[in-house]
Image: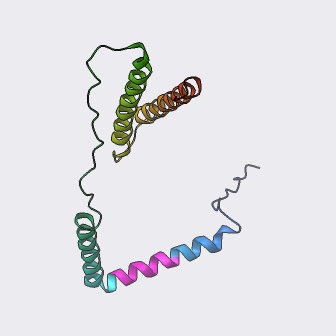
Amino acid sequence: MYRKTPSDPASHAGAWDGLLDRIRRTGASCRRLVERYPVHFFAGMVACMLCSGILAFTVMRVGTPHTLPAFSPPPSGGAVPELTGTIDTYSAIREVAELQQVIAAIVQKDTLSAADSILLTDALRRFELIQRSISTNDKNNPAP
């Protein structure tokens, strides 16, 4: 009257049996190979580590970082009304140079955080706004 319900021990039964058996056999053969030739595998591991170290300190070494040119300060003389557009353009160029330095500093980092990506998108958005304002100023005030 009280019978035990049969359990299903093979939850991965079906098509995966052959693959899992093959993986087990491959793992066992690799283990036997390493146990049979441990010195060769140890020497190979040390050689790989040496090659990695040599490549890391020679081939993949980064050269000196290039710096962006610094702009000279704006003219200190009395500003004539015709020079306001020039001074605005100069300040826009200076701001673009600062944005370029911010972007270059972010790009040179090895790992980026969420704050870095927000800072980068804000810098690129501000760069685009400056570019648009300069192009609209050029359309409104053509050169003589």
Residue drawn at point x = 70 percent, y = 57 percent: 6
Is residue 32 a member of the stretch shown in magenta? Answer: yes
Count of numbered tags: 0
Residue that lies at the very extreme toward the front in this rendered image: 144
Q: In which quarter of the image is residue 39?
A: bottom left
Q: Where is residue 130 in the image (x, y as percent from the top left)?
A: 49, 28
Residue drawn at point x = 51 percent, y = 28 percent: 134
**In the depicted structure, whether residue 113 falls above or below residue 13:** above
**In the depicted structure, whether residue 132 falls above or below residue 59:** above
Horizontal relation, residue 48 to residue 95: left or right = left
Residue that lies at the very extreme toward the right in this rendered image: 1
* Magenta stretch prevailing secondary structure: helix
Q: Nearer the viewer, residue 24 or 107?
A: 107
**In the depicted structure, whether residue 83 falls above or below residue 63:** above
Q: Nearer the viewer, residue 66 or 27?
A: 66
Q: Position of residue 4 (x, y in %)?
A: 69, 53
Horizontal relation, residue 8 to residue 96: left or right = right
Residue drawn at point x = 52 percent, y = 29 percent: 143
Q: Nearer the viewer, residue 107 or 111?
A: 107
Q: Position of residue 133 (x, y in %)?
A: 53, 25
Is residue 65 a member of the stretch shown in magenta? Answer: no
Give, as a single range, the part of the protein colored magenta: 25-34
Q: Nearer the viewer, residue 59 or 92?
A: 92
Q: Position of residue 142 (x, y in %)?
A: 55, 28
Q: Which colour scheme is used?
A: rainbow
Residue drawn at point x = 38 percent, y = 22 percent: 87
